[in-house]
Amino acid sequence: MMNQFGGHGWAMGWGWIIGIIFLIVIVWVIVRFINQGKIDQSRSKSPLDILKERYAKGEIDKEEFEQRKIDLL
């Protein structure tokens, strides 16, 4: 006997759930891809670059910057 779903039975009721799960997976993959780029950029900084950033932010003064720069080189 055919029911109101055209003979597909209970499977038609689960279609929207599968669609939502599929969309969630796509969004998760996109977010992971975007965040991976940010992680790679932070790993590629040299110690001297980090030292320069700290000096630019005012976390260390000129004397400390120069001393640490000598230590690094």
Image (spheres, rainbow, N blue to C red):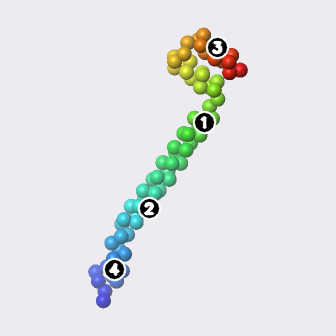
Question: Hey, which quadrant is residue 42 in on the image?
Answer: top right
C-alpha distance separating marks 4 and 1: 53 Å
Of tags 2 and 1, the one toward the viewer is 1
Q: Which residue is mark 1?
A: 43
C-alpha distance separating marks 3 and 2: 55 Å
Residue that sits furthest to the bottom in the current view: 1
Q: Who comes first in sequence, dot 2 or dot 4?
A: 4
Q: Are marks 2 and 4 in contact (CB under 8 Å)?
A: no
Tell me the tag on residue 22: 2
Q: Determine the secondary structure under disc 4.
A: loop
Of tags 4 and 1, the one toward the viewer is 1
Q: Which residue is mark 3?
A: 67
x, y percent for residue 31? 48, 48
Q: Which residue is mark 4?
A: 9
Residue 15 in the figure: left or right of residue 33: left
Residue type (three-letter) at the residue carrying disc 4:
Gly
C-alpha distance separating marks 2 and 1: 32 Å
Q: Residues within 10 Å of mark 3 (few under 14, many from 20)?
A: few
Residue at figure coordinates x 31%, y 79% from the top left: 5
